[in-house]
Image: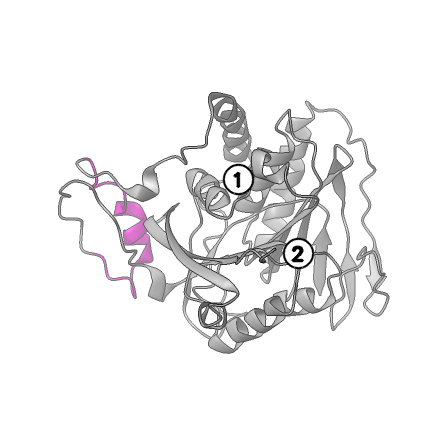
Amino acid sequence: MVKRIWLAMNVISLGVAAAVPTVLQLQEKQEPQSCDPLTSFHCLVTHGYHTRSDTTYMADLLPSTISKIDASHHQRVDEILKKHWKPNDGFFGLSNIYNKALTYGEVTSLGCRQLAHAMNISTSSLREKNNTVFVDVGSGVGRLITQLYLDLSMEPSFNNTLKVVGVELSQERHDIGVRALRGALKDLLNGEEMVNPIEEHDIPHDQLNGDNTTIINSENSTISFSYTFKESSTIELINGDAVEYLKLSKDPITHVYMSSLCFPEHLLLELQNELLQRPSLQVVAALNRLGAFAENKATWIESEVPIQMTWGPGFVKVYQRRPTEG
């Protein structure tokens, strides 16, 4: 079943092979505790930041574009996220979904802002665009996608068209995200009722509307819940298959972030094939290298940026469409 929620959120599902991040340091660092990434991801998460007192990491630095006004707004967003998401949300097994050992981690609140900066998503950059549709593939419990939505759409000067979509395969993580998001929105509205009515309903999977009000599942139906802020910014959570979503969505997707470290190779290839067929796509970021984009140098520019993760400093591959001449 594909569950859909008109709201926004973002997070990362990670594979065990990704547990040892490459770090860029500006000063000599102390010896970290030895952790085996194949047997103890918890060790890496627990000790990742405890041995860094003499180290400055590029992944720990705020983007230079963050202003004092942004910082004040971000502080409020961080407080809301902390209230409605627990630190251990999402950290459980997925053996029923993937036939391989998995672990879980997320982009931190700072990492989310670093990622947005790297993908050219900000209140100032969005003013130059007519429409932005951001999709988080592997959105987990929805923390990242929610933060991105709140950072942008709830900023006082924001008046652009924005849609953020989180697609997560695990129903447990999706449900955690839905509950947390409802609470976050209630806090943001100071306990007042949402302007637009909330609707939940089942829709047969073969009734996909042209306006994308239905996301199909190959099995049963879609459960919908929608919220739009300022009549122009929408947040949406979907519990289902990302490839199917990309095949069916009519949205002009512009930005995609993939929590791809634990994705099987065939899934990663399918996702890339679907994304490359979208002329509206401008930026793709992923936790590992995307060969189909990297090899298409005539169209895509590949770069690597430091991003703060829950397990420590990490890097994200970013692919930006080359500007058209003329």
Q: Is residue 228 magenta?
A: no
Mark 1 or 2: in front is 2
Query: What element does badge 2 sit on?
Result: loop
Relative to 304, residue 178 above or below = above
The quadrant of the rendering that contains the C terminus is bottom right
Query: What element does badge 1 sit on?
Result: loop
What segment is highlighted magenta in the picture? 35-53
Q: Residue furthest bottom?
A: 266
Where on the picture, by quarter, is residue 73?
top right
Residue annotated with mark 2: 253
Please name the residue shown 48% across and 74% down the image.
Answer: 264
Q: Which mark is residue 85?
A: 1
Please name the residue shown 71% across and 41% down the image.
Answer: 161
Q: Nearer the viewer, residue 94 or 29?
A: 29
Q: Is residue 46 magenta?
A: yes
Q: Nearer the viewer, residue 201 or 9?
A: 9
Categorize mark 2 by other alpha carbons within 10 Å: few (<14), some (14-19), many (20+).
many
